[in-house]
């Protein structure tokens, strides 16, 4: 099981990964020569799925960290 500091670090890492995914989708759209509307939709849809999964995990880690803050060592 992860301790509070590890959960905090992992949540921050997940937020940074979300930023990188969103930035990567934006830059890849600019860098391509022949961009079709269908391809843009698929890339954005994939990015939204990945980001929503990572965001849900990060929020769950933060919620667990807040719930375990008041517990003693014996609990």
Image (cartoon, grey):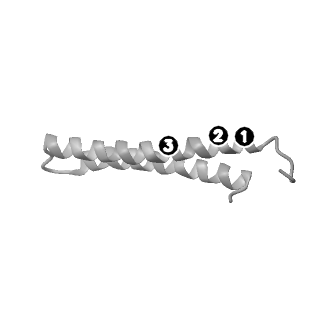
Q: Which residue is mark 3?
A: 55
Q: Picture coordinates of residue 67 (x, y %)? A: 72, 40
Disc 3 or disc 2, which is closer to the eye?
2
- 70 or 13: nearer the viewer: 70
Seen at 73% across and 55% down, the residue is 3
Q: CA distance from mark 1 to mark 3?
A: 18 Å
Q: Check the image and name the residue furthest to the bottom.
A: 1
Seen at 26% across and 47% down, the residue is 43
7 left or right, relative to 43: right
Q: Are marks 3 and 2 in contact (CB under 8 Å)?
A: no
Q: Which residue is mark 2?
A: 63
Q: CA distance from mark 1 to mark 2?
A: 6 Å
Q: Are marks 1 and 2 in contact (CB under 8 Å)?
A: yes
Q: Picture coordinates of residue 24 (x, y %)? A: 36, 50
Q: Picture coordinates of residue 52 (x, y %)? A: 43, 42
Residue 67's tag is 1
Q: Secondary structure at mark 3?
A: helix
The image shows residue 63, relative to residue 11, as above or below, that is above
Q: Picture coordinates of residue 20 (x, y %)? A: 44, 50
Q: Residues within 10 Å of mark 1 (few under 14, many from 20)?
A: few
């Amino acid at each position: 099981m992860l301790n509070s500091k590890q959960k905090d670090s992992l949540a921050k890492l997940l937020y940074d990964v979300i930023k990188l995914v969103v930035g990567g989708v934006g830059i890849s759209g600019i860098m391509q020569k022949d961009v079709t509307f269908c391809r843009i939709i698929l890339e954005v849809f994939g990015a939204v799925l990945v980001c929503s999964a990572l965001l849900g995990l990060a929020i769950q880690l933060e919620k667990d960290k807040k719930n375990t803050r008041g517990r003693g060592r014996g609990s």
